[in-house]
Image (tube, rainbow, N blue to C red):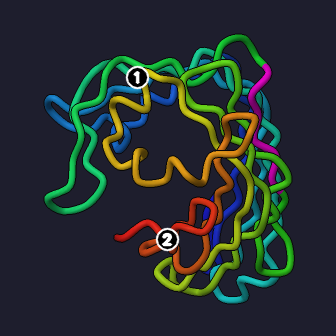
């Protein structure tokens, strides 16, 4: 429901396919996502007083996959991605809470697929999305298939930890994040 001050949104998801959202389709020849997402999302967004917004997300992700296609990272920067499987089964999840002008990312976890990801932290909101800022930390690991598809990973090989994962830090504005893999800042 929508009001002059903002909107409320509540959803219970049962095997939701993220590929059904048009903005993630990647366009003609782009990467196509499929998934089975279960759980709930509740949002009460106050646009005039963002600090009064509240909400939560508690989702389990299973069978998140992409079909082969072109992945555009930025203007003039793209990669031909193979078919990838990001999760198998239901051990992957997203848990977030929204209050007092920030989204606390309690858990953002992908496991048992081509990309292992385990990230927590905060996203700080503002009246304008361009002013949202983040401070997220965690780890990621890539399968050999994904390492071959992403050419810049060889540049951070020295940052790899004994367990095969890489330390990951995402800070700054959402539209131009600073990405650090260990001590290496990814040039954007």
Residue 23 is situated, as x and y percent measured from the top left of the image, at: 35, 44
Viewer-proximal residue, 168 or 162? 162
Residue 185 is situated, as x and y percent measured from the top left of the image, at: 49, 71
Q: Is residue 67 above or below residue 103?
A: above
Viewer-proximal residue, 82 or 96? 82
Q: CA distance from mark 1 to mark 2?
A: 27 Å
Which residue is rendered at x = 70% and y = 26% of the image? 111
From which residue to which does the magenta span run?
A: 91-96
Magenta stretch encompasses residue 135: no
Q: Quadrant of the N terminus?
A: bottom right
Q: Answer left or right for 111 relative to 70.
A: right
Label 1's element?
strand
Q: Quadrant of the C terminus?
A: bottom left
Residue 188 is marked as none
Residue 155 is situated, as x and y percent measured from the top left of the image, at: 41, 53
Q: Which residue is mark 1?
A: 66
Viewer-proximal residue, 32 or 14? 32
Viewer-proximal residue, 91 or 156? 156
Label 2's element?
strand
Numbered disc in front, either 1 or 2: 2
Q: Is residue 108 above or below residue 111?
A: below
Which residue is rendered at x = 40% and y = 45% of the image? 154
Query: Which callout, 1 or 2, points at the residue further toward the start of the chain?
Result: 1
Q: Which residue is mark 2?
A: 185
Q: Quadrant of residue 93?
A: top right
Q: Is residue 30 above or below residue 68?
A: below
Which residue is rendered at x = 28% and y = 40% of the image? 71
Q: Quadrant of residue 45?
A: bottom right
């Amino acid at each position: 429901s929508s009001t002059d001050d903002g909107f409320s949104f509540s959803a219970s998801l049962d095997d939701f396919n993220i590929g059904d959202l048009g903005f993630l389709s990647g366009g003609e020849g782009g990467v196509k996502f499929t998934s089975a997402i279960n759980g709930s999302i509740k949002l009460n967004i106050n646009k005039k007083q963002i600090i009064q917004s509240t909400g939560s997300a508690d989702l389990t992700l299973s069978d998140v996959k992409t079909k082969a296609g072109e992945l555009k990272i930025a203007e003039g920067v793209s990669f031909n991605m193979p078919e990838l499987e990001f999760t198998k089964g239901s051990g992957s999840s997203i848990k977030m809470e929204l209050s007092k002008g920030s989204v606390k990312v309690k858990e953002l976890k992908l496991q048992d697929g081509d990309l292992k990801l385990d990230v927590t932290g905060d996203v700080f909101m503002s009246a304008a999305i361009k002013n949202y800022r983040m401070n997220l930390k965690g780890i990621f690991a890539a399968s050999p298939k994904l390492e071959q598809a992403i050419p810049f990973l060889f540049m951070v090989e020295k940052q790899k930890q004994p367990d095969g994962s890489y330390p990951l830090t995402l800070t700054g504005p959402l539209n131009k994040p600073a990405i650090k893999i260990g001590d290496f800042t990814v040039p954007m």
